[in-house]
Image: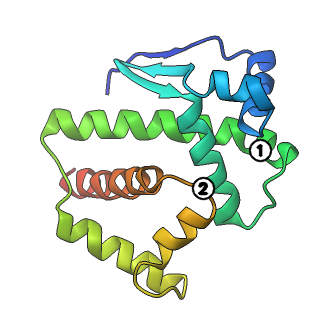
Amino acid sequence: MSQRIGLALMSGATLTLAALALCGAPARAQESVHRIVAVVNDDVISNADMNARTRLVLVGSGLPDTPENARRVLPQVLRSLIDERLQIQEAQRLGVSVTETDFGQQVALIEENNRMARGGIYQMLAQNRIPRATFDAQVRTSLVWQKLALRK
């Protein structure tokens, strides 16, 4: 894959500022939610994307949603979002997609593995203020990447 990745000012100081915005610094956080954090080819990753994924990682790992934990996972979250954008772009380039049936089966499997009732994952996301699209994108990327791996 020959992609270019442009990170918009992600120095250590900016990472810290992004982490503070993610953790609820009142007015500044709301102003910076839609700021661009990274550009992967022509695809933008915003603070809103980072915020939602950070909450998903914290909830999924059972870590308390604290500013310190958010700062700790921030580099991993950014790297994951960049990798996923590259994976989706490669899948699109090769014409690989995920069917709704495959997606539904994967969500059902995740719920089963976590001892949740059908629809339980989306209830948990709503309770934790995590957009459904954040979870769905991660699941779709995982599935499409599995398909690509099986092709090779």
Could you say where residue 44 lies in the image, as x and y percent from the top left?
A: 43, 23
The disc label shown at residue 125, or none: none
Q: Which residue is mark 1?
A: 70
Whether the residues at callouts 2 and 1 have beta carbons within 8 Å, the answer is no
Could you say where residue 86 lies in the image, as x and y percent from the top left?
A: 37, 33
Q: Which is more toward the observer, 149 or 124?
A: 124
Q: Could you say which quadrant of the image residue 59 lies in? A: bottom right
Query: Is 48 above or below relative to 61?
Result: above
Local crowd size for mark 1, using a 10 Å CA cut-off: few (<14), some (14–19), many (≥20): many
Residue at the image point whose x is 78% and y is 23% from the top: 17
Q: Nearer the viewer, mark 2 or mark 1?
A: 2
Horizontal side of residue 36 vs 24, given as left or right: left
Q: Give the residue type that dot 1 points to.
A: Ala
**Residue farthest along the right direction in this orientation:** 68
Mark nearer the N terminus (2 vs 1): 1
Q: Could you say which quadrant of the image residue 67 lies in? A: top right
Horizontal side of residue 82 vs 54, given as left or right: left
Q: Which residue is mark 2?
A: 129
- Mark 2 lies on a secondary structure that is loop
- Mark 1 lies on a secondary structure that is helix
Could you say where residue 45 lies in the image, as x and y percent from the top left?
A: 49, 28
- Structural distance between the alpha carbons of marks 2 and 1: 15 Å
Q: Give the residue type that dot 2 points to.
A: Arg
Could you say where residue 82 lies in the image, as x and y percent from the top left?
A: 49, 33
